[in-house]
Image (cartoon, rainbow, N blue to C red):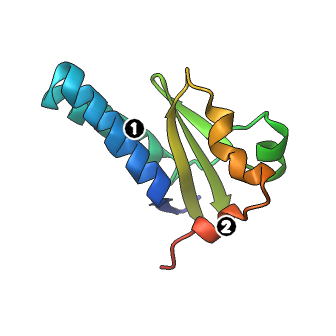
Amino acid sequence: MSEMKLELLAPAWSELEHIADIHMSLSGAVSAKKITDKILDTLELLRYSPQLGVLCSEPLLKYDNYRKIICGKYLCFYRVIADTIYVYHIVDGRSDYPKIFGELHNGIDLNSNLKET
């Protein structure tokens, strides 16, 4: 399989920055860099193996073909659309992560979050 495009959407970038901030305040800059590098390196693997993550089991997420990949205690949620992998959210797996997709219940089209390239 050829290399696919990888795009982190605004919410995912914001969540990654928040994760870095937490690690920075708890353990310092080395920890913050280590965790963000680990997450980004894991996401890079998707470029060559987009099916590496598992299909989400939550009904609405499964219906829209959302997948998740585990990176330590964090979950990265993404979809493959054409030749691009869109990363929607990066969350602590111990959180109530289905809440972040509450907009699905409210009828918001998550495709509207896609940036134009």
Q: Nearer the viewer, residue 100 or 36?
A: 100
**Where is 89 relative to 27, above or below?**
below
Label 2 to label 1: alpha-carbon separation: 23 Å
Frontmost of labels 2 and 1 is 2
Can residue 36 be seen here? The reply is yes
Q: Nearer the viewer, residue 20 or 83?
A: 20
**Where is 94 relative to 16, above or below?**
above
Measuring from the top left, give residue 44's x and y in whole percent: 43, 48
Measuring from the top left, give residue 76's x and y in whole percent: 53, 40
Q: Which of the 4 image quarters holds residue 32?
A: top left
Q: Which of the 4 image quarters holds residue 52?
A: top right
Q: Residue, x 67% and y 45% (percent of image)?
A: 101
Q: Residue, x 54% and y 62% (percent of image)?
A: 2
* Residue 8 horizontal side relative to residue 82, left or right: left
Which residue is tagged 1? 39
In the image, which disc is placed on residue 111? 2
**Where is 93 relative to 117, above or below?**
above
Q: Earlier in the sequence, mark 2 or mark 1?
A: 1
Q: Nearer the viewer, residue 93 or 1?
A: 93
Measuring from the top left, give residue 65's x and y in whole percent: 76, 50
Q: Are marks 2 and 1 in contact (CB under 8 Å)?
A: no
* Residue 17 horizontal side relative to residue 80, left or right: left
Q: Residue, x 56% and y 58% (percent of image)?
A: 86
Q: Amino acid at mark 1?
A: Ile
* Residue 40 horizontal side relative to residue 48, left or right: left
* Residue 88 horizontal side relative to residue 71, left or right: right
Number of numbered markers = 2
